[in-house]
Image (spheres, rainbow, N blue to C red):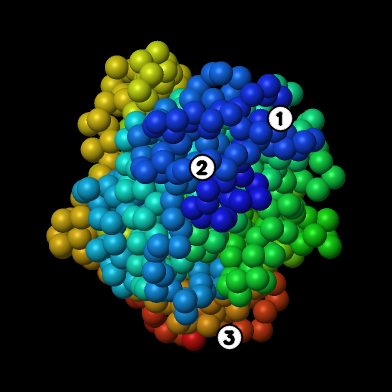
Amino acid sequence: MNRETAFAGQTPRFTVWAPSADSVTLVTRDLEREMEAVAQTGYWSICPDRMPDDGRYAFKVNGKGPYADPRAPRLPDGVHGFSQLVDHEAHAWNDRRFRARPFASAVVYELHIGTFSDEGTFDSAIPHLPELSELRVTHLNVMPIASASGTRGWGYDGVGLFAPWEAYGGPEAFKRFVDACHEHDLAVILDVVYNHLGPEGNYLGQFGPYFTDRYHTPWGDALNLDGPQSDEVRAFILDNLEYWVRYYHVDGFRLDAVHALHDSSAVHILEAMTHRVGALERELGKPLVLIAESDLNDPSLVKSHDAGGYGLDAQWSDDFHHAVHCLLTGESSGYYAGFGGFEQLAKALTRVFVRDGHYAPHRGRSYGRPVGDTPRSRFVHCVQNHDQVGNRAFGERLSHLVSEGRTRVAAAVHILSPAVPMLFQGEEWACTAPFQYFTDHQDRDLARAVSEGRRNEFRDFGWDPEDVPDPQDEETFLRSKLRRFEQRLKAHERMRQWYIDLIRIRHDVPSFSCSMHTVPEVVYDAEAEWMLIFRGSCAVAFSLSRSVSPVIPVCRAPNSHRYGDATVGFTGLSDPDPKTVLLASDGVDFTDGILTMPPDALAVLGP
């Protein structure tokens, strides 16, 4: 529906923005009615004498079409079909008392509805929510659900931004899913994409100047956020955020690739989002979060408006992932160049961005800036996510690349870091299923281009293009579904318990809780391959040495013992040194303040 009536539910008035059109026609299954131009607004409106029985409708613009409503609340026949009205008052919500935990104390879990369960729907995901409650995650980061072409995909090719994908069950099923999440004390963060729309079924340009050729993105035309007639494009985005909060009760958003939101306006669209969401928070009395994905390493995204920032609640930091991944796997190609040492991990733990104004080999230039005293709870860390797993040629998870011991080390350093940790579905039991890139484009030329592009993308990495999974092949999608039966197998059950124990420590031990905003103290010996990460009166220690069992003195004083060639991030805290073992790998010994550890082992120490 339109800007003014987007939240009015089922209404007899249809309105659409088409500022350059000479005529706009409302089309239903059995009638066509010319719409009236609303003077000097660019809107067209009509109140038909009767409503279509099936609620389906579309628009013709200058005689072309019919096209789905840009704000279609439902697309039951796919992105090329008619829109359908939705009665948003029909669902009886049961979440009146639910309030999300403060994001600073969150443990996030990223999931993809299509592969999270065998059936791949909102309803089939609900029976698995108790497993996430037992894990004690607090927020679910749901990959995009906006309507897209076909019946499978990652979600980043969405074109019906107001319409939950029918492949997942449509609007009512998504409401049931959110309601069930809240019943299990799980907040829902919806992944939304505003930097581009998908290539198939994208008819926005038929209605008005939603896109611009002044900027470009790697995925398609950029949205017109600062050019002529951009006010209504911006309203389209802001209304979309409000729509998901009001009618689907979501608790926040992950904003995809905000570096591709090209906007030279005095009030950037990101700042406008924080104002709109802040107003909703105050009106509804519920906490909401805005989380950015960005490759700029710019802390201004999460700084307050008064400090000259955009005022977002948090942003992803890929540098932590790269530092952990490269240290554990030894990989160093592409954007991993320059990572892989203990120094980079220490910097990621203490200063968040490794690239904070320094030269990045894969870009051939310097980028980023220091985060300064920005609270570390404003950053989200992971060791796996959909991008870092799925953008590998074969979709390997970290547990496919390294030993069980190193997988456990990664989990502990990640979950007990000062940033907000995020898990990727199946990570908690070292799922053997890959997560590969899959699509279901119906346009044959587009499908062929996507398949060929995927093969060529990895040619430079030394893979035979014929070995790279075809994203259009349904088997690529099916291989990516979680193998839930594995949780009952001993090795996977043991890994899941490791994650449960780590998350319990994060929630229950004060030194690891959200109240600890101090920068960690990190000591490491790169030659001996061990690291100590002090958090208040606690510490995380790990050894990657394969040739010797290192002797690690657990003491803060940098002059008391030889710590190798560097120390990073000392804060001069007066907390006592850890004395007890809270969690440890087999074979770890902690006696009289001295740790001895077998290869690929870890210990979590407490007061």
Q: Earlier in the sequence, mark 1 or mark 2?
A: 1
Q: Are marks 1 and 2 in contact (CB under 8 Å)?
A: no
Q: In the rendered view, does 555 fall on the left or right side of 461?
A: right
Amino acid type of the residue that numbered disc 2 sits on in the rendered structure:
Asp
- Write down the residue under mark 1: 19
- Write down the residue under mark 2: 49
Residue at disc 3, secondary structure: loop
- Write down the residue under mark 3: 576
Question: Mark 1 to mark 3: distance in Å?
Answer: 67 Å
Residue at the farthest top position: 445
Foreground: disc 1 or disc 2: 2
Residue at disc 2, secondary structure: loop
Of 256 and 162, nearer the camera is: 162
Foreground: disc 2 or disc 3: 2
Question: Mark 1 to mark 2: distance in Å?
Answer: 25 Å
Question: Mark 2 to mark 3: distance in Å?
Answer: 77 Å
Decide: is 522 above or below 76: below
- Name the residue rendered at 39%, 74% in the picture: 94
Of 72 and 34, nearer the camera is: 34
Quarter of the image that includes the N terminus: top right
How busy is the neighbourhood of tag 1: few (under 14 within 10 Å), some, or many (20 plus)? Answer: some
Amino acid type of the residue that numbered disc 1 sits on in the rendered structure:
Pro
- Name the residue rendered at 78%, 55% in the picture: 309
Q: Earlier in the sequence, mark 2 or mark 3?
A: 2
- Residue 52 rendering spot, x and y as whole percentages: 41, 41
